[in-house]
Image (tube, grey):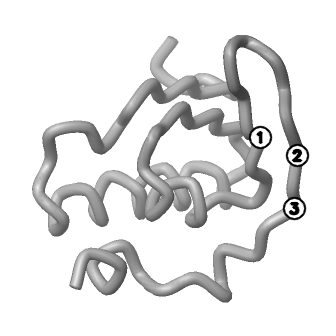
Amino acid sequence: ITNPQVLLADEPTGALDSKTSGEVMQLLTDLNAEGRTVVVVTHESGVAYRTKKIVHIQDGVIGSIEENDPKQTKPFGELMK
């Protein structure tokens, strides 16, 4: 379990300051770039928009699925200003 191909992250930036949140998201981005699948559950739009695909779920039902280009999104710290 030291080198998983799929990583599930439930609120990985919850209760973190913006600098540490950015570092966590960069780590997850790097792991994804290495070929791992990363699934992030979050209520934070700044975190969601760092991903390639966003799935909106409400009351247990998928409301929408949208492709996203994280390169078009401001860095996490910039979203907090």
Label 2 Cα neighbours within 10 Å, binned few <14 / some 14-19 / many ≥20 = few
Mark 1 in CB contact with mark 2 (< 8 angstroms): yes
Q: Say which label, 1 or 3, has the lower sequence index.
A: 1
> Gap between marks 3 and 2, in whole Å?
7 Å
Tell me which residue sits at (11%, 57%) in the image. 17
Mark 1 in CB contact with mark 3 (< 8 angstroms): no
Q: Quadrant of residue 81?
A: bottom left
Taking depth in this image into account, of 53 and 80 the one nearest to the observer is: 80
Q: Is residue 20 left or right of residue 69?
A: left
Label 1 Cα neighbours within 10 Å, binned few <14 / some 14-19 / many ≥20 = few
For residue 34, above or below residue 62? below
For residue 1, above or below residue 16? above
Q: Which residue is mark 3?
A: 67
The x and y percentages for residue 2 are 46, 20
Q: Is residue 30 left or right of residue 44?
A: right
Label 3 Cα neighbours within 10 Å, binned few <14 / some 14-19 / many ≥20 = few
Tell me which residue sits at (65%, 51%) in the image. 32
For residue 44, above or below residue 5? below
Secondary structure under badge 3?
Answer: strand
Tell me which residue sits at (18%, 65%) in the image. 18
For residue 40, above or below residue 4? below
Q: Which residue is mark 2?
A: 65
Name which residue type carries label 3: Glu
> Gap between marks 1 and 3, in whole Å?
9 Å
Q: Which residue is mark 1?
A: 55
